[in-house]
Image (cartoon, rainbow, N blue to C red):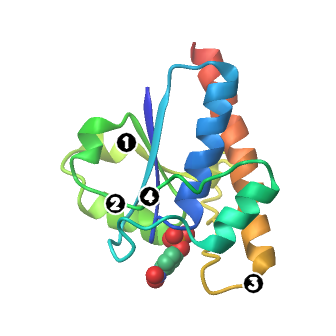
Amino acid sequence: MKILMVCLGNICRSPMADGLLRAKVQKEGLNVIVDSAGTGGWHAGEAPDPRMQETGAKNGVPIDFLRARKFSVTDFDEFDQIYVMDSSNYNDVIAIARSEKDKEKVEKILNLIYPSENRNVPDPYYGGAKGFQDVFDMLDKATDEIIRQLKIDE
Ligand code: 4NP
């Protein structure tokens, strides 16, 4: 099982989702590979935003080792499930899908905990520190649900 987290810059939301899920997968001893990518490539090669790193570290989930990369069409072949953070990410990823099979892999991550509501994980990049903690809390709940489902499927 391979799971990809996707946002716009791959320096705030998706690396936090990636780090949270990696930590939980490791804790549970599950055979799951986790990665993240951005629909935009401006920050490729960079570590996560220092504010997201700080929030992760403060909550016991360090993400300093992650590096940003741009989402690629080959990610549809590589990954079984692609979780996007907001509607804009969803549209960008769906736009380069080659088939229904590709499209079926894509889901907005908050639909895991608020089914069919199509909620967005807000982009914290231009906001204050509280935005980063809010993002952490949402992604913590959503990744708990991924783990719950993975354990059922095991
Ligand atoms: P992210 O946040 O998509 O959660 O990583 C952003 C980071 C950078 C930019 C936009 C969003 N940017 O425009 O550089």
8 vs 70, left or right, is right
Which badge, 3 or 4, is on the more N-terminal residue?
4
User: Which quadrant of the figure has residue 20?
Assistant: top right
Residue named by callout 4: 67
Image-based side of 126 in relation to 39, left or right:
right
Q: Are marks 1 and 3 in contact (CB under 8 Å)?
A: no
Q: Image height check: is 148 above or below 114?
A: above
| Separation of marks 1 and 3 at Cα, in angstroms | 34 Å
For the residues labelled 2 and 1, the Cα–Cα distance comes to: 11 Å
Q: Quadrant of residue 57?
A: bottom right
The residue at which mark 1 appears reads as 104
Q: CA distance from mark 4 to mark 1?
A: 27 Å
Which residue: 53% across, 58% down?
14
| Amino acid of disc 2 | Val
Point 67% across, 51% down: residue? 62
Q: CA distance from mark 2 to mark 3?
A: 27 Å
Residue 93 is tagged as 2
Q: Nearer the viewer, mark 1 or mark 3?
A: 3
Q: Is residue 113 visible?
A: no
At horizontal 78% and vertical 48% (from top left) the residue drawn is 60
Q: Nearer the viewer, residue 54 or 13?
A: 54
| Disc 3 target residue | 128
- Distance of mark 2 from mark 4, alpha carbons? 20 Å
Residue found at the far front of this picture: 65
